[in-house]
Amino acid sequence: MDTEKKTKFISFNKQDFLMVCMIVLSALIYATGMNIFVHSGNLFPGGYAGIARLLSLVSTEYLPITLFIFLHLFWIEYSDFFCGMEKSRS
């Protein structure tokens, strides 16, 4: 018996490639707008971007550790709890 496993490869056509390029371009435009207008004008946009900016500014102003590092340390310590696994203590 000949048992061959066929591997599926993801194929991208021209439309998929253009969609990825448009997503990257829109992210660059958004980041440029945030840096030029929001950060330099000390503004807070609405939604999650404003909340993230507010938490970032508060954490760098009043905490000895930045929020980015704090969240990574928190996730490393409690990732087993959030994923539903129990830590093995030896």
Image (tube, rainbow, N blue to C red):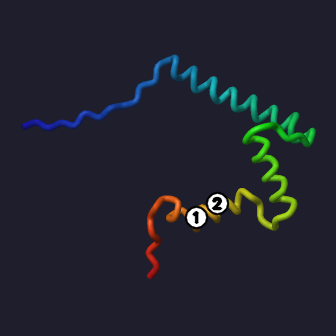
Residue 44 horizontal side relative to residue 30, left or right: right
Instruction: Work out whether residue 46 or residue 70 is closer to the camera in this orientation and state it.
Output: 46
Separation (CA) of disc 2 from disc 1: 6 Å
> In which quadrant is the C terminus drawn?
bottom left
- Where 1 sits versus 90, above or below? above
Residue 73 point in image, percent of width and height: 64, 65
Q: Is residue 60 left or right of residue 82?
A: right
- The kind of residue tagged 2 is His
Asked if labels 1 and 2 touch by Cβ distance under 8 angstroms, the answer is yes
Task: Quickly name the residue at label 1.
Answer: 76
Question: Can you tell which quarter of the image residue 77 is in?
Answer: bottom right
Residue 34 versus residue 24: which sits nearer the camera?
Answer: 34
Q: Position of residue 25 (x, y in %)?
A: 68, 27
Which residue type does callout 1 highlight? Answer: Ile
Residue at position x 79%, y 42% from top? 50
Is residue 1 shown above or below 73?
above
State which quadrant residue 85 falls in.
bottom left
Question: Picture coordinates of residue 76 (x, y %)?
Answer: 58, 64
